[in-house]
Amino acid sequence: MATDVKYRTDDASNNNVIGKKAQLFPKKAEVDLSFENLSYTVNTFSKFKKVKKEILHGINGNFRSGQLTAVMGPSGCGKSTLLNVLAGYSISGSSGQVYLNDSLRDEKQMANISCYIQQDDYVRDLLTVRESMTVAAHLKLPTTVSAVSKASQVEDLLDALGLSIHGDTVTKRLSGGQKKRLSIALELITNPSILFLDEPTTGLDSQSCSQFVSLMADLAHNQSRTMVCTLHQPSALLFEKFDQIYALSSGQCIYQGPPNFVIPYFAERTIVCPPYHNPADFLIEVAIGEYGTDVLVKLADTTKISYIKDHNNCHLISGDQELQLENGTCLKNNNIADKKQTFKSKILNKPPYYLQAYHLYLRNVIMYKRNKSNLMLRVLAHFVIALIFGYLYRGVGNNASLVISNMVFVYGTNLFLVYTGQMAVIVSFPLEYKVLKREHFNSWFTLFPYMISILLVEIPFQILCCLVYIVPSYIMTSQPLELMRFSYFTIFLVVTSLTSQSTGFLCGATMPVKVSVFVGPVFVVLLSVFGFAIRFTDIPAIYVWLHYFSFVRGSFQSLVYTLYGFGRGVLPCSDEMYCHYKNPMKFLTEMEFAQVNIYPEFFYICFFFLCTYVLTTTVIWYRLNKR
């Protein structure tokens, strides 16, 4: 595990580094974020009835540019919910007004000037720090920015955030604090005006917490960014590092102002902090109701009144104001310049689709190369099973007395490649989705190039796995060594495996892992029954549609016809007196395969493949954009 290295705390150094960035990319507008009467409700179920539960209760607030604001409160008070609503991560169920410099928030504009870093550090574990930053720069910055400028931008940010000496370290080997800083660096590439962070100090020791909060303060002050983060219960040292505190209690705001005014503010309201007590702990104690619930109601009402007065006449309490402790009043701070009512933020043109797909593909290739053990295991598994199947069913392909055994081999081969195609992605994609959701929400790329990049690495590798299995097993089982039959046999198995892989993506994209690993195989087993375990004439009328729907059935019948159809001659009969299926056509007729037309079946499997990926992309798009 790499050791945390203290980042630069010298203001001149940081300003110099970020100054270089400003020369490369235009600085975005300074943005004050305010909200009025903000509420958020969710639907819950109680005794089999749908009940609406209100998480935020009509709160008001103002987060200013150039300040680091901490949203504090006990667990379950609505801190993360508030951040989700303000960032646009959760919209459904919210009400109220959110303003950017006194102009109503526009979602597209908000996405362009802000980014959201969630509590969990979802980064690409198999990329180095520099590779992660470089890919992000290519994806997020326009093509008008040269590669040299992008590389300079990456190095400047790594230097500013204390990650330059870890540039060649694989991300999974970083410490918790370094991963937090990398998460910020990835989003600072586009120089956002507003940065939201959910519980950024979770899992960090006291020294790392102090360094990280100081870093956030520097980022807020250097270019007048609006930095908003949630905290649970910081130490007294961390508490004093913030410019503003926004305290919540059960979805109500009970305080907004500088940290050094917390104690006198509550003392004026007869809530006295014990001597030598941590103000942050005191604030949490007030929020959980240790000083009475009536006090919380009064504090919430006072905060609303103060906000209304501030919005119309004056600013909220800030660090260089003289505090007046008259109930419901606040003073103007003449040192704070009035912001413009409206602002324009130039939207950076993202790279075209083909370039997005190209850079995402290169990223996937790098990660695949570094995940050699998993890839080699998949290839080895296909080869070992090919040897086992080839030995068990040796010689069945050219023996009239073993035609049924050969059909079982074909069925097992088809089912094996269906399962390996599906299960390889059905488990991995839900883990991939967590990173995808963060990157897509922060406008790294659009969904279509991402899906293309995934297929460009998964499909060739799955084809390789299929060939590793097909070639030895085909030869060992003495199947006909004819180019046409071998080609059709291979093509059908490969296309079927890829189609099954598409169902794995669909299950992984729509269900939790524990559900998808059950539903996916059950779905395949259901489809595999038709054509093998039951003949068409024996299928109940209610299930006939499943016979036609099953791509596994179409593949199996086409494989059998490929081996025994197309005018294949009489089969050798070994030493037995009678071989019932000496004539291959007799076998096909009894199995009801004689009328199989492999070409429509092939096009149907390809159609199933395309439809499944279209459906998968649609489902992922819906989940990513469901707010």
Image: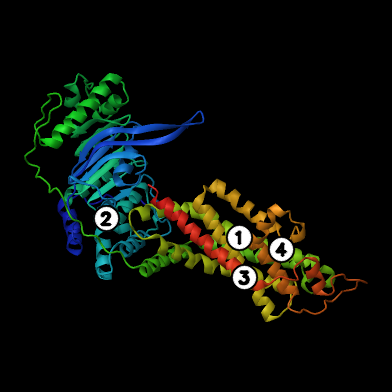
Q: In the depicted view, which residue is nearer to us: 183 or 75?
A: 75
- Marks 4 and 3 sit apart, C-alpha to C-alpha, by 17 Å
Tell me, yes or no, whether the two marked residues, 3 and 1, touch with CB atoms within 8 Å.
no
Q: Which residue is mark 3?
A: 602
Measured as percent of width and height from the top left, residue 119 is found at 36, 44
- Marks 2 and 3 sit apart, C-alpha to C-alpha, by 45 Å
Q: Which residue is mark 4?
A: 411
The nearer-to-camera label among 2 and 3 is 3
Relative to 134, say whether 317 is above or below: above
Q: Which residue is mark 1?
A: 420
Measured as percent of width and height from the top left, residue 121 is found at 38, 49
Measured as percent of width and height from the top left, residue 590 is found at 81, 66
- Marks 2 and 1 sit apart, C-alpha to C-alpha, by 41 Å
For image coordinates 10% across by 27% down, the residue present is: 324
Q: Farthest left residue?
A: 334
For image coordinates 56% across by 50% down, the residue present is: 516
Q: Amino acid at mark 1?
A: Thr
* Secondary structure beneath label 2: helix
- Marks 1 and 4 sit apart, C-alpha to C-alpha, by 14 Å
Tell me, yes or no, whether the two marked residues, 1 and 4, touch with CB atoms within 8 Å.
no
Q: Which quadrant of the structure image shows residue 298? A: top left
The nearer-to-camera label among 3 and 1 is 3
Q: Amino acid at mark 4?
A: Tyr
Q: Amino acid at mark 3?
A: Phe
Instruction: Using a 10 Å C-alpha cutoff, classify the residue at mark 1 as few (fewer than 14 neighbours), some (14 to 19) or many (20 or more).
Output: many
Q: In the depicted view, which residue is nearer to us: 395 or 551?
A: 551
